[in-house]
Image (spheres, rainbow, N blue to C red):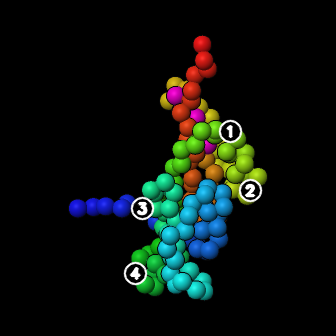
Amino acid sequence: MFRNPQVNFYVRDVEAAARFYTELFDFTETFRTPTTGTPEHVELRLDGFILGLASIESARRVHDIPADSGPPRAEVCLWTDDIDRTYTDLLAKGAQPVSPPHDFLNGRLRAAWVADPDGNPIQLVAEVTSPAQ
């Protein structure tokens, strides 16, 4: 049986990536190895979701995985209440813009994308609420 799913990103600088997710998105660090010195793997949690950040070098050396920081193959998707404010706040804090806020699915959802320090995309999405009539 499967349990406790998480997404892992292979990154150039685990410490910088962890700082990005904890400071900008309120993830909480739950695991780090090694516990002192330069980390090779850090796990962060947000509302039951686990994001693992592993160094490209350790993935190659420890697991013989041909990890690279090449084109993104996945993204972290985070739901929020105010896309426009959140997007603006994240850019002010140093997130890189990917796609500005826009409506889709016939106006039912609003989304925007930013990137972490390694270029991994982060989707911000919200349900669009109709004004009170």
Residue under label 3, please give it: 6
Residue under label 1, please give it: 84
Query: Residue 65: in sight, yes or no?
Result: yes
Viewport quadrant of the N terminus: bottom left
Label 2: few (<14), some (14–19) or many (≥20) C-alpha neighbours in 10 Å: few
Q: Contact, CB < 8 Å: mark 4 with mark 3?
A: no
Q: Quadrant of residue 3?
A: bottom left
Q: Which residues are magenta?
A: 108-112
N-terminal label among 3 and 1:
3
- Residue 93's disc number: 2
* Residue 38 position within the rendered picture, expressed as x and y whole percent measured from the top left: 60, 83
Residue under label 4, please give it: 63
For the point 43% across and 84% down, which residue is it? 62
* Residue 100 position within the rendered picture, expressed as x and y whole percent measured from the top left: 66, 41
N-terminal label among 1 and 4:
4
* Residue 26 position within the rendered picture, expressed as x and y whole percent measured from the top left: 61, 57
